[in-house]
Image (spheres, rainbow, N blue to C red):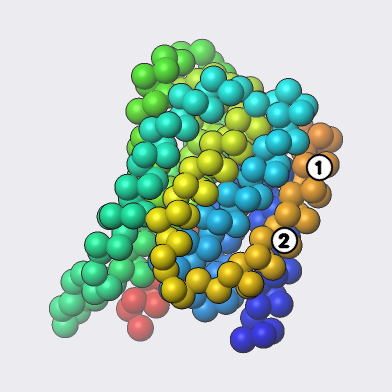
Amino acid sequence: MENDHLVGYSLAVLVGISLGLIGSGGSILSVPIFVYIMGMHPALAAAYSLFVVGISALVSGVQKAKDGLVDFKKVLAFGVPTLIAVFITRKIIVPSIPEMLVITDQFTLSKRLLLMVVFALVMLVASWKMIRPGNETKGNSSSNPFTISLAGLAIGFIAGFVGAGGGFLIVPALLFLANTPIKKAIGTSLFIVAVQSLIGFLGDIPNPNINYPMLLVFTGCALFGVLIGNRLSKVIAGEKLKTVFGYVVLGMGIYILVKEIGFSAS
């Protein structure tokens, strides 16, 4: 277990790099690390992910704000409905899901399988939007605050359900719904992710299974990665950031689907 933790701490640096570089991807990396490397149940991994991503995104977001890369009006338009949705999902919906949902002779649907498969499917949809070239600022999508708030509400429910900060959904939403340049979308996403993740984690604080010393060490490693990611983001073109992240999300989504479906069939 100690070796597993050391590997997990090393990979935590990648979580921070992802957040600092592309404003998202923290949960996409941290949830699989907690589940597959450190051997946690997906529901507990989701709680850990919310804390790690929340703290790391906040530190990175402050730096982006200093560089003028945060649109605080859009932070509010997304943030309020997202906060409500994440808190309700983490506090009420996820705890109410039974460990075993369907049991037959041919198939078993567990809470673990449901959480991870939903997580993977959302990742595949987001990756497709990110990989498609050259159409993030066509101007044919409404920047109406009501539209943005509805998107924030939907993203909040999804993020709370799978334990994601939601940046891998928020960045595309800012690009396509609010016509936001990629680097400003990244900075804006970080503040939204930070607030919603930390609020979402409040619903998990009563959980007696949370190992806070281990969680803080993992978070510290992620913060080191944030410093690296922020520096790299200043020298890499925005369109390249979008495409690279899309392929990372695609690969992780396929991996989780194959692993979980194979796991359930074995």
Q: Can residue 218 be seen at all in this image of the molecule?
A: yes
Residue 131's x, y, as percent?
A: 57, 39
Q: Point out residue 88 in the picture as x, y percentages from the top left corner.
A: 32, 47
C-beta proximity under 8 Å, tags 2 and 1: no
Which mark is drawn over residue 139?
none
Q: Quadrant of the N terminus?
A: bottom right
Name which residue type carries label 2. Answer: Gly
Q: For this view, does 129 lie left or right of residue 228?
A: left
Residue 167 pos. (x, y %): 54, 42
Task: Name the residue that disc number 2 marks.
Answer: 220
**In front of the other: 258 or 161:** 161
Amino acid type, mark 1: Leu
Which residue sits furthest left? 104
Mark nearer the N terminus (2 vs 1): 2
Question: Quadrant of residue 62 in the image?
Answer: top right
> Which residue is found at the position 42% from the left and 39% from the top?
83
Percent x, y for residue 265? Answer: 33, 78
Question: What separation in Å lies between label 2 and label 1 (alpha carbons)?
Answer: 19 Å
Label 1 crowd (10 A; few <14 / some 14-19 / many >=20):
some
* Residue beneath disc 1: 232
Residue at x 63%, y 50% (from the top left corner):
55
On the rendered image, what quadrant is the C terminus found in?
bottom left
Q: Is residue 258 visible?
A: no
Disc 2 residue crowd, few under 14, some 14–19, many 20+, Cα 10 Å: some
**Which residue extends farthest front?**
206
Q: Residue at x 28, y 55 (%)?
A: 93
User: Where 52 falls versus 189 (above or below)?
Assistant: below
The answer to which quarter of the image holds residue 34 is bottom right
The residue that appears at 73% across and 69% down in the rendered structure is 10
Nearest the viewer among 198 and 134 is 198
Give whichever of 86, 199 is nearer the camera: 199
Q: Secondary structure at mark 2?
A: helix
